[in-house]
Amino acid sequence: MTTAVLKNVRALPLVCTNCAEQFDATTSAICDSCLAPLEPLYAKDRRLPSREELRERTRSIWRYGEWLPIEGEPSDSNEVGFTPLFEVPRLAESLGVGRAWIKNDSVSAPSLSFKDRVVAVALNAARALGLDTLGCASTGNLANAVAAQAARAGLPSWIFIPEDLEKGKVVGTSICGANLVRVRGHYDHVNRLCAQVADRFGWGVVNVNLRSYYGEGSKTLAFEIADQLNWRLPDAVVAPMAGGSLVTKLHNGFGEFISAGLVYGNLPRIFGAQAARCSPIVNLLETGESHVTPVIPNTIARSIAIGNPADGVKAARVLEGSGGWGAAVSDREIVTGIRLLASTTGVFTETAGGVTVAATQELVRQGRLGPRDEVVLCITGNGFKTIEAVEKGVGDSPIVNPRLDEVEELVASR
Amino acid sequence: MSIKVSLPGVLAKLTDGQNTLDADGSTVAQVVSDLAARYPGLGPRLQNADGEPYEFVTIYLNEEDIRLAGGFEAAVSAGDELTVVPAVAGG
């Protein structure tokens, strides 16, 4: 199903990452010849903006248009990105690192996770390619982002999720009018089904057949971190890992800004965080194997519970090559991480954010991060979506009668 | 014994336009060899020069990733279904 191609937005051609065959802009993320992933082909001689020019531009991901696979004026989701970055000294002290900042995508517009970035790029690619229906396979945050942005754009969406996701993510998707389908099984089953759905229906399934465009949106996290730190790169960045794409795109993003001469400092060490009960990429790092061994996910960190990470090998290489590493943390540590972040910064993150904080603690314990490091923690999702993970421990607040003496007694007891 | 094999659309040009094929074998490797013999263009898309699966192609035996069931050596029997899909990213 297609509509007229919009004239003012164009998607870049693609190139195979394995055999280098080139393709016109297309609704396929895999090479016809060898099935390997495709990536956008940027013109090497394109003019890049200066820091001063960038500063004059809109405060959204589109500020960095020369590094995104869309040419021309974006037709939709113009306001996505530019979430707050702020220093968090109390958290830095608790963690035992020199300085720490939060890149707070838990307040990303419109759907409260970093997935807004990738969907904004995929949606504009879909427009450029004349597609009129969006879809995705999701662990929740992507479902919210596709549902929200498709609704605003006036496009129907078909969204496939594991059957037992957190209520907040299910309701937050349905409310936008999406066709939400719950699939029996875990995310890897959903993913497989969506590869077939994309083949069968020709929809723009953002993380399947639009994946080459979609993934590039993650680079904007790196661009914004550099921009908001006044073009100075941090020593290290910690981010959660699911399919493994985010850490590779962070690395690419920082590298592209270094190549463009926009930033001071060296390529940050990139650290990846996983839940111990679904940690195929950390396993890969620790065993030194060359292939991912899939695992069956069984963790409260549902949004990153991907047992068969498509970009796992690439992610492990990027972490190690950057001088970073990975860490996996228990479900109990994840909840402690959520609490630590909230109680030292006021930011209430979802389970994936708890993984990031707890993994940072673990990396400090291992001596991989420490007092000399300036670290940015990527907080990629919002805690109000995964209340289930933490509600047990906070439900016992005292109830008093409306009498001052009862409050006096309570205050005295604390 | 007959195993049903589902292929992604981009490979149909190598199999006379068919997305679904029947093949013989008692392991995944034998099924792949059977298909490779009948459709010479398809073989190199399912296995590399060493006869190993590619990291960017996932093969499911019924509902299970073959890497959880022995990889190319996983046993198959009549009525089983193999599904070949390109590896895709997270969500």
Image (spheres, helix red, strand yellow):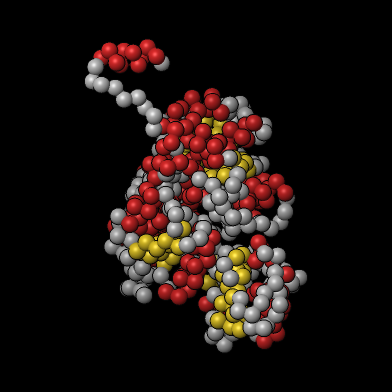
Residue B5 visible in rendering? yes
On screen, residue A296 above or below A21: above
Residue A227 visible in rendering? no
Q: Where is residue A398 in the image (x, y as percent from the top left)?
A: 35, 24
Question: In which quadrant is the C terminus of chain A drawn?
Answer: top left
Look at 47% across and 62% down and name the residue there. Answer: A184
Q: Where is residue A257 in the image (x, y as percent from the top left)?
A: 53, 46
Left or right of A261 on screen, residue A363: right
Look at 38% across and 57% down and name the residue there. Answer: A146
Look at 56% across and 31% down and name the residue there. Answer: A374
Question: In which quadrant is the N terminus of chain A drawn?
Answer: bottom left
Asked whether B16 or A332 is in front, the reply is A332
Q: Position of residue B18 (x, y in %)?
A: 54, 84
- Quarter residue A123 falls in: bottom left
Asked whether B78 or A358 is in front, the reply is B78
Left or right of B2 on screen, residue A138: left
Q: Where is residue A361 in the image (x, y as percent from the top left)?
A: 58, 33
On screen, residue A265 above or below A410: below
Left or right of A321 on screen, residue A25: left
Look at 61% across and 64% down and name the residue there. Answer: B65
Residue farthest left in this picture:
A402
On screen, residue A45 above or below A335: below
